[in-house]
């Protein structure tokens, strides 16, 4: 594949304080069978400004940032910014799937966003470009830079939505033979760049099918064409997922597209050391995350909320991380209104 300088970022966002959104969600809450309405999923750490500032500081080469919402927009965001494209759910998600309170239809339909580049990177609002990057951080020779490593998922009945990762792998195994895929792209799969994950992959090569894939909760590069391939292969499955207003045990998610890219060899090996995800369970976790922010050594950085973090500790932890962001990204970006 050819090198393409056009790389977009896509970031969906939910305003948990938006009263219209809360009222609409409440009207459908009785349909929620998965406990997806847990407050911590939408607890706002107030770091969105720093996401944009980090993009401008560490990835100034990005072509367009597609900011995806159900209609709410931060009052400080400059919607006239030349690199910003505001995308409403209505603009690209099929009408029969709206309104939605699940991340699945929002993420599974990204390829329908008008003007989206073939090469794009998906971020949640807790995933940051944590160090100076280049386009080659995310794509090389037209392929996503991604970590290829086998894994075994340990399912828990306390969170039935975990079944989506099993469902994803099942779809991949329907369309790809693991041994043939890895043999055809052995240099990508058996790579020293996988670091600590390589022994796990080697141990699982004897499996008859893909047992699972290592998933990092960090920014994920995608090819729009991979999305289109998966939709062409499994339109009924994906559409049925998109019809679920809340997360459901029957869902697949966008990791299916990531795994499709890996199984088809449409990737370039990433270095495991480039990924760091901090699940903030304690104040100490917040302090470690703050240190990583200040060091600016990790291109893929995630600051993830946790249900184990009490509301009281949340305030202390968020303050620690915010001070770190402010020390590095204190200046407003061009994505922010002036004055």
Image (cartoon, helix red, strand yellow):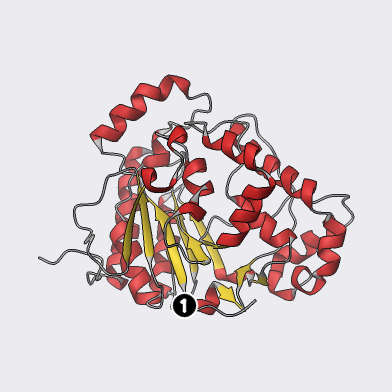
**Residue at the limit of the structure toward the top, as seen here:** 30
Q: Is residue 2 above or below residue 145?
A: below
The image quadrant that residue 24 belongs to is top left
The percent position of residue 288, horizontal first and vertical second, equals 45, 62
Q: Residue at x 84, y 54 (%)?
A: 177
Q: Nearer the viewer, residue 306 or 181?
A: 181
Q: Residue at x 46, y 39 (%)?
A: 307
The image quadrant that residue 178 belongs to is bottom right
The percent position of residue 27, horizontal first and vertical second, equals 35, 22
Q: Residue at x 34, y 25 (%)?
A: 26
Quadrant the C terminus occupies = bottom left
The image quadrant that residue 98 belongs to is top left
User: Residue under circle 1?
Assistant: 133
Q: Is residue 105 above or below residue 25?
A: below
* Residue 215 visible, this angle: no
Quadrant the N terminus occupies = bottom right
**Residue at the limit of the structure toward the left, as seen here:** 339
| Secondary structure under the numbered disc 1 in the rendered image | loop
Q: Residue at x 75, y 57 (%)?
A: 150
Q: Nearer the viewer, residue 57 or 8?
A: 8
Is residue 129 left or right of 56 when viewed as pictured? right
The percent position of residue 161, horizontal first and vertical second, equals 59, 35
The percent position of residue 314, horizontal first and vertical second, equals 35, 45
Is residue 109 left or right of 98 when viewed as pictured? right
* Residue 110 visible, this angle: yes
Query: How many numbered circles are shown?
Result: 1
Label 1 environment density (alpha carbons within 10 Å; few <14, some 14–19, many ≥20): some
Q: Nearer the viewer, residue 54 or 25?
A: 25
Is residue 82 left or right of 278 when viewed as pictured? left
């Amino acid at each position: 594949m050819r090198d393409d300088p056009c790389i977009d970022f896509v970031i969906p966002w939910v305003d948990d304080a938006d009263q219209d959104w809360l009222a609409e969600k409440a009207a459908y809450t009785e349909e929620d069978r998965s406990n997806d309405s847990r407050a911590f999923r939408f607890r706002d750490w107030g770091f969105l400004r720093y996401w944009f500032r980090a993009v401008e500081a560490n990835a100034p080469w990005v072509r367009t940032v597609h900011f995806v919402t159900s209609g709410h927009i931060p009052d400080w965001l400059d919607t006239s910014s030349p690199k910003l494209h505001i995308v409403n759910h209505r603009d690209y998600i099929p009408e029969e799937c709206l309104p939605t309170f699940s991340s699945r239809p929002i993420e599974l339909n990204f390829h329908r966003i008008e003007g989206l580049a073939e090469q794009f990177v998906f971020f949640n609002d807790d995933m940051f470009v944590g160090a100076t990057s280049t386009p080659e951080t995310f794509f090389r020779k037209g392929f996503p830079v991604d970590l290829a490593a086998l894994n075994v998922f340990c399912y828990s009945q306390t969170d039935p939505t975990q079944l989506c990762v099993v469902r994803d792998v099942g779809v991949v195994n329907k369309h790809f033979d693991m041994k043939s895929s890895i043999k055809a792209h052995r240099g990508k799969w058996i790579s020293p760049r996988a670091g600590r994950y390589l022994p796990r992959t080697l141990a699982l090569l004897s499996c008859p099918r893909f047992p699972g894939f290592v998933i990092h909760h960090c920014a994920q590069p995608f090819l729009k064409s991979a999305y289109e391939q998966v939709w062409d292969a499994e339109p009924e499955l994906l559409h049925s997922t998109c019809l679920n207003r809340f997360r459901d045990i029957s869902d697949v998610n966008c990791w299916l597209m990531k795994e499709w890219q890996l199984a088809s060899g449409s990737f370039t090996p990433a270095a495991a050391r480039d990924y760091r995800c901090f699940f903030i369970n304690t104040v100490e976790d917040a302090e470690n995350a703050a240190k990583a922010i200040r060091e600016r050594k990790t291109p893929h950085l995630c600051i993830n909320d946790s249900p184990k973090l009490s509301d009281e500790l949340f305030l202390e932890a968020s303050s620690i991380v915010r001070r770190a962001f402010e020390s590095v990204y204190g200046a407003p970006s061009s994505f922010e209104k002036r004055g």
